[in-house]
Image (spheres, rainbow, N blue to C red):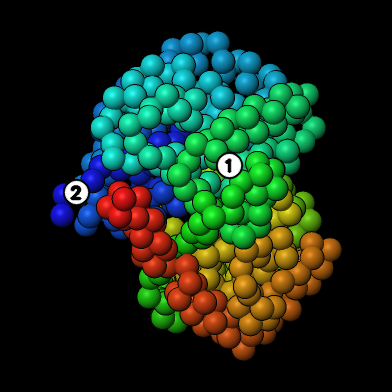
Amino acid sequence: MIRKKILISDTAPLYPPMWGGPKRIWGLFSNLTHKYDIIYVGVDTGQYELVKGIEASEDFFEKRFSMPESYYKYWLPIYERLFKNLNFDPYTYFFIDNAKHYVDALESQPADAIVCSHPWSWNTLKYRTDSPVIYDAHNCEYTLMRSLAEGNLFKPILTHKTKVLEGDLCRRAKVILACSEEDKQAFVDVYKLDPGKISIVENGTDIPPLPSLKERVAAREELGYARQPVVLFVGAYYKPNIQAVDFIVNRLAPKLPACQFVIVGTVTNAFSDSQAPENVSFAGILTDDYLEHYWRAADLAVNPMSKGSGVNIKMLDYMAAGIPTVSTPFGCRGLDVENEKHVVISELDNFATAIWDTLKNPELRGLMRKKGYDYVSTKFDWKILSKKVEHILDQLLFDR
């Protein structure tokens, strides 16, 4: 069989995947290199020079580019003054077609199929008519933008531009990959789409072996958490995550002084140790190997989120790591989980009590550890979900 080339585009660095978007791309497509040659084209706003190609794995190549000089010289001061409260960069959403190296790569890269991951690169890709387009929709971005831009002076402009961009992509795409039934329905309602062109491909996670009790004890000792319960939250620098950590710092930690709350991920950039009680620590960005120590050391994970879109990858990661979890009902969206079986589900007003009651109940935590792990292993393993994408690509490229 002739190997086909798949071009994937987004406006972020990909490898190693550190947060939800790159994790979804890597999880779904890195498992397809037995059949397809995959090239990812993205940008890195933290780089001041052109970034060379990264061989993420055999048959999976990343081309990552810096932003234009004008981005650093002119845009960033505007962003700091007018948009910082958004916790995303509107330039990478709406003006990325000014990044010449990135645009040139998208326009010139040979491809048998194009995957537009998020809609932000569509202003460049829409001029290509040589290959079928798949929209890998991590969210219904229009409905999410209405929430993220709340309170910003430019909300009407941001939501309008998102709707126009995403709507055009939805209409042009041969297939749309939605993360949940809720997102699929949002696309149908907002853009009046044929439901038949929308396939559900959920978010997923890697499924490691469950750690043994000996491994969990060793991790706690290595990290210095041998004496107190460890409660973990992992998240990227993203407004709903920042709100969740703010809730942990200002409401949960003071009510639960016997617990050590550990915050991991780029969300920690929004906080400093001086803002937090003594029983909150910020571990920052961790490599996968070091993060594994925190997975093993945690007695409990929490997901006190009340905004966002799609299935929370962190929920899947928690359960795959065998960590009993307390979540809001919203944090469990898109998951068919039962209270006090797979997770403990609690409203924010009762969250501290739910955490403490769960920590005092080792039998319940043992049940959730097993049931949560079994649930994600059978339904949300990236290897299983990749098969759905492979089938869609096969139909699009080989069955015509």
Q: Position of residue 130 (x, y in %)?
A: 33, 31
| Quadrant of res 192 | top right
Q: Which sits in the foreground, 384 or 192? A: 192
Q: Which sits in the foreground, 84 or 223? A: 84
Q: Is residue 64 visible?
A: no
| Quadrant of res 303 | bottom right
Q: Give me the residue at 45% from left, 28% from top.
A: 126
> In the image, is residue 47 above or below residue 372?
above
Q: Secondary structure at mark 1?
A: loop
Q: Which sits in the foreground, 75 or 184? A: 184
> In the displayed image of the protein, which residue is found farthest to the left?
1
User: Which amino acid, mark 1?
Assistant: Tyr
Q: Position of residue 359 (x, y in %)?
A: 66, 77
Q: Position of residue 123 (x, y in %)?
A: 49, 25
Q: Position of residue 17 (x, y in %)?
A: 40, 48
> In the displayed image of the protein, which residue is found farthest to the front?
400
Which quarter of the rendered picture does the N terminus lie within?
A: bottom left
Q: Which sits in the foreground, 102 or 264? A: 102
Q: Give me the residue at 58% from left, 80% from top.
A: 368
User: Which amino acid, mark 2?
Assistant: Arg
> In the image, is residue 201 above or below residue 228?
above
* Residue 3 circle label: 2
| Image position of 229 (left or right of 30) | right
Q: CA distance from mark 2 to mark 1?
A: 37 Å
Residue to which mark 1 is pinned: 237
Q: Is residue 120 visible?
A: yes
